[in-house]
Image (cartoon, rainbow, N blue to C red):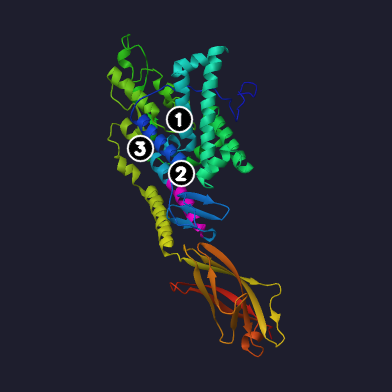
Amino acid sequence: MSSSDSTPEHLYEAREPVFPRRVKGNFRTLKWWIMAVTLGIYYITPWIRWDRGPSLPDQAVLLDLANRRFFFFWIEIWPHEFYFVAGLLIMAGLGLFLFTSALGRVWCGYACPQTVWTDLFILVERWVEGDRNARLRLYRQGWNLQKVRLRATKWVLWLLIGLATGGAWVFYFTDAPTLLYNLVTLQAHPVAYITIGVLTATTFAFGGFAREQICIYACPWPRIQAAMMDEDTITIGYREWRGEPRGKHRKAAGAENLGDCIDCMACVNVCPMGIDIRDGQQLACITCGLCIDACNDMMDKVGKPRHLIGYMALTDETAERGGATPKSVWRHVFRPRTILYTTLWSAVGIGLLVALFMRQPIGLTVAPVRQPLYVTLSDGSIRNTYDVRLRNQQHEDRPFQISITGPQELKLTLEGTDGTVVTVPADKSRLQRVYVIAPANSAPAHRERTEIRLWVEDTKSTDRVSDNTVFFGKGK
């Protein structure tokens, strides 16, 4: 074919508004429940209280960036314990791989924030403007008082949802009741207003005007998920061998040769992405199951078997075409790939739980001061300096005793105190300067480097932790 006859390909297609029709069924009910639960968790969680004592915040879930702390009910994560957050992110990734391998884009269809908020926006749109046909008529008609009123009402409600979304987000980073009062009285920090404004605008735009474009062009997961799927992955498909040839006129001559599909377009009209699942698997399909509900409803009305459109795997399609019995659902779900993902997911989870319950309530970090490397005192002894960060993760003040193990000649002193015991406030850290001294004629004073270990002991509970470091001398 010559270049003049070919149609140029476009990487981006301008959005055509989609007006999905309301549908009832098992998958639609499931999506309502998931939307209610996830939105409820998001909006309500910052307001849940949790008593941690007088010196700590009483918000159950709080990302306290000012004090570099993360509170989750009874769990408190410190900056040096960021591996817990990393572990949770790894579990989330493995969980996404697992569900995609077993059930395709089930995350996209039911629990993705873009899907959840889009469902909410469509619900508002349908409540204000009517179902599919009414919205189509309103879209095609010219601007008049009715259209202005309906559009303005819808957009105001969308903006309020966006405002609530942005407001709920900032409540996770500081005390929610206090921040709400400061926001209303215009006393909050400008960062709070800017964050709320940005999230309000993005929620309004993504949920209202760029619904399908976000899933098709902005989100990378549709392109990645293909690597997670194989012929045993359960996803939504059209049983073409049963539905074709499709046709509407069941009483006309030759109707006995028609398939079960009556070409009613119900599956297309309910699709939030505006695609036709009968065309096969497509990048835009989020496997939300609404087309199954619509098709099942129509099959019931015309007296045909259900599941002309349904969840199935490629191996099931091959088996059904040949008249064989497809595999059971469990044989699709439990197979080597999903078992591997489940094992890895479980291993990370168990590791995090073990680390959580075995972590010490005290801690230290030793940072040698190397400018200068060491100091020679007037009596010829050698002194090394260390900055020791002491952490008290308990809810009361604790006396910490600092000691050293290494050559017997080494002596330890603390800056600002005569002894070796310091008090660390409740749920705080303290930076303590520590000096280690080697007498002039001792072996460490003449050795280039000596391995030592600093210890910290809670004198009340006898909990102990240590950290290795190095003592430098003059060398030979």
Closer to the eye: label 2 or 3 = 2
Q: Determine the CA span between mark 2 and mark 3.
A: 48 Å
- Classed neighbour count for the residue bearing mark 3: other residues with Cα under 10 Å, few (<14), some (14–19), many (≥20): some
Residue 84: in magenta span: yes
Q: Is residue 83 above or below residue 188?
A: below
Q: Tag on residue 315?
A: 3
What's the magenta region? 81-96
Instruction: Give coordinates of residue 351: x percent, y percent.
Output: 42, 59
Residue 471: in magenta span: no
Q: Is residue 105 visible?
A: no
Closer to the eye: label 3 or 1 = 1
At mark 2, the secondary structure is helix
Instruction: Give coordinates of residue 106: x percent, y percent.
Output: 41, 38
Q: Give the residue displayed 41% in from the left and 50% down from the top.
A: 341
Q: Which residue is denoted by mark 1 in the rendering?
A: 119
Q: Quadrant of residue 7?
A: top right
